[in-house]
Image (spheres, helix red, strand yellow):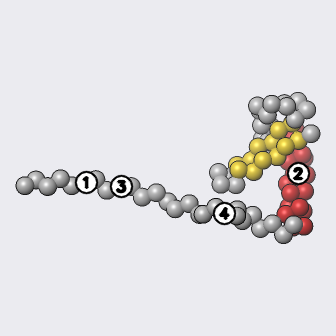
Amino acid sequence: RYKLINFYELGYWELFDLEKDPLELQSVYDNPDYAKVVSDMKQELTRLRDHYQDDGTVVGQQPKKPKRPRKKAVQDAS
């Protein structure tokens, strides 16, 4: 009935009530009426990660390097 999504690279979560919102248009993650659902689902996620020994590593993905500002080209005045 529910779908919990963790956008770990962006640092936020979404929760959808698929019975009331099958198109996943409105996250109810911050809705206090769903606080127990969020808590229960996060607890289950932790249990499953422990069971499958999932440390959260994303296979095949290189860590992102911070972008450096480009240096402006200096024109020769001669």
Q: Amino acid at mark 4?
A: Gly
Tell me which label, 1 or 4, sits earlier in the chain: 4
Q: Residue at x 60, y 63 (%)?
A: 62
Cα distance between the residues tagged 4 and 3: 28 Å
Say if mark 1 contacts mark 4, CB within 8 Å.
no
Task: Check disc 3 and report its element: helix, strand or loop.
Answer: loop
Task: Check disc 1 and report its element: helix, strand or loop.
Answer: loop
Label 3 neighbour load within 10 Å: few <14, some 14-19, many 20+: few
Residue 19: image x %, image y %? 91, 32
Mark 1 vs mark 4: give the one in front: 4
Cα distance between the residues tagged 1 and 2: 53 Å
Residue position marked by numbered label 4 in the rendering: 60
Cα distance between the residues tagged 3 and 2: 44 Å
Mark 1 vs mark 2: give the one in front: 1
Tell me which label, 4 or 3, sits earlier in the chain: 4
Cα distance between the residues tagged 1 and 4: 35 Å
Residue 33 picture quarter:
top right
Residue 17: image x %, image y %? 87, 36
Label of residue 73 in the image:
1
Q: Amino acid at mark 1?
A: Ala
Which of the pair 23/37 is nearer the observer? 23
Q: Is residue 61 visible?
A: yes
Label of residue 41 in the image:
2
Residue 10: image x %, image y %? 65, 51
Cα distance between the residues tagged 1 and 3: 9 Å
Tell me which label, 3 or 2, sits earlier in the chain: 2
Q: Amino acid at mark 3?
A: Arg
Label 4 neighbour load within 10 Å: few <14, some 14-19, many 20+: few
Say if mark 3 contacts mark 2, CB within 8 Å.
no
Q: Amino acid at mark 2?
A: Met
